[in-house]
Image (tube, rainbow, N blue to C red):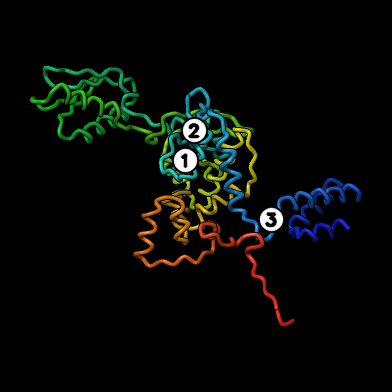
């Protein structure tokens, strides 16, 4: 009887098989199995749409209404290193507007088995952290008389000293660079001003030596059995070249970097995860199917499109729908010049002209045989 109930609601075969497996695994009695089936059927019925349901509008309303009620807790600092993470409505806006440069990019890096220890995580963190020349300098001074910049390095290997000297020489080809016994000197032209000296000094301090550029703030945390590196920066592609990093589980919250490294499906998965995490932190529970529907609309072309005038809404086939969203006159003029036709297949353009919408009972035509 219970099995027939599942078939009545058109429950898919995979779910029926899963119920059977759970019943065997838990050794459920016939009465308990029947109770489980009834509960699954009820939940399945709740989650089903009726034919003609305008679920696009329901999805949009289900996400946007709770989003407007979010609290103003919009930023969060991860650990003591001060890695700032954007939360709340600002983060949702970044995702739905498909911003190429989010305000705070955080990479979550998991390690291969042999490096999945505290010591291993620290070694990997040391490798990927950006190190500028200022990290190796003990003192740097300006000689205003001879127009020189004198650099005294901290104690490091001769190989590192040689590498730093080569970097400075390569970067400042027009200046005279000399390696002295305990320091390096950079001599400018005699007509150089104090401002020129200050500019060169700043460039020397910011000169990249080792690690991955932009990866500065970094912390190591333990999550379950894994040691995880949380790092801010936008060089995910370069980090994935390290053999110590588990490429199957590591990710970044920058959807465009995920698209570039792993493809559109990975970018979509991160969008869903980020939306769910953002809503969860605000105590909001929204059906996964709504977020998946929106992210499908944003990614089904193989590229990431924003929900806006230059993305999903701006590329609707209906002229009136595009005009009704934003830039009304511009859309009407463009479509009239291009001789476009609106076939009134969507909801909004039919509402505009006071016609029956193609949803619910309006999506069906009534055919009658009057002679009978």
Question: Which numbered disc covers residue 86?
Answer: 2
Tag shown at residue 126: none
- Please state the horizontal and vertical placement of residue 331, each as a whole percent of the image: 39, 57
Crowd around label 2: few <14 · some 14–19 · many ≥20 (10 Å): many
Mark 2 vs 1, N-terminal side? 2
Check disc 1 and report its element: helix, strand or loop.
helix
The residue that appears at 63% across and 42% down in the rendered structure is 286
The kind of secondary structure element at disc 2 is strand
Whether 101 is drawn above or below 44: the answer is above
Q: Are marks 2 and 1 in contact (CB under 8 Å)?
A: yes
Please report contact status of discs 1 and 3: CB closer than 8 Å, yes or no. Answer: no
Nearer to me, 101 or 46: 46
Q: Do the CB atoms of the residues marked 3 and 2 lie less than 8 Å apart?
A: no
The answer to whether residue 142 is left or right of residue 38 is left
Along the horizontal axis of the image, is 227 left or right of 2? left
Q: CA distance from mark 2 to mark 1?
A: 9 Å
Instruction: Single out the mark in the foreground, 3 or 2.
Output: 3
């Amino acid at each position: 009887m219970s099995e027939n109930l599942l078939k009545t609601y058109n429950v898919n075969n995979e779910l029926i098989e899963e119920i059977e497996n759970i019943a065997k695994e838990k050794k459920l009695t016939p009465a308990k199995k029947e109770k489980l089936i009834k509960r699954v059927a009820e939940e399945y019925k709740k989650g089903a749409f009726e034919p003609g349901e305008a679920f696009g509008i329901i999805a949009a309303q289900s996400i946007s209404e709770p989003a407007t009620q979010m609290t103003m807790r919009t930023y969060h600092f991860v650990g003591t290193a001060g890695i700032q993470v954007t939360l709340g409505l600002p983060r949702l806006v970044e995702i739905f507007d498909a911003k190429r440069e989010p305000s705070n990019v955080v990479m979550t890096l998991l390690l291969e088995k042999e490096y999945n220890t505290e010591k291993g995580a620290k070694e990997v963190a040391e490798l990927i952290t950006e190190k500028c020349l200022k990290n190796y300098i003990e003192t740097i001074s300006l000689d205003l008389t001879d127009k020189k910049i004198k650099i005294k390095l901290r104690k490091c290997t001769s190989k590192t000293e040689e590498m730093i000297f080569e970097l400075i020489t390569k970067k400042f080809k027009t200046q005279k660079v000399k390696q002295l016994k305990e320091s390096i000197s950079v001599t400018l032209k005699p007509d150089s001003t104090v401002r020129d000296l200050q500019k060169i000094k700043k460039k020397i301090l910011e000169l990249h030596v080792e690690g991955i550029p932009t990866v500065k703030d970094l912390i190591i945390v333990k999550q379950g059995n894994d040691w995880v590196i949380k790092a801010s920066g936008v060089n995910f592609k370069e980090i994935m070249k390290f053999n110590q990093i588990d490429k199957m589980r590591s990710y970044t919250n920058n959807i465009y970097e995920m698209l570039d490294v792993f493809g559109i499906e990975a970018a979509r998965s991160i969008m869903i995860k980020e939306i769910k995490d953002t809503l969860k932190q605000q105590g909001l529970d929204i059906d996964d199917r709504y977020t998946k529907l929106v992210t499908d609309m944003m990614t089904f072309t193989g590229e990431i499109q924003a929900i806006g005038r230059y993305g999903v809404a701006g590329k609707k086939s209906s002229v009136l729908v595009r005009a009704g969203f934003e830039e009304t006159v511009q859309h009407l003029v463009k479509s009239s010049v291009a001789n476009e036709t609106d076939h009134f297949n969507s909801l909004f353009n039919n509402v505009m002209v006071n016609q029956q919408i193609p949803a619910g009972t309006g999506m069906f035509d009534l055919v009658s045989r009057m002679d009978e």
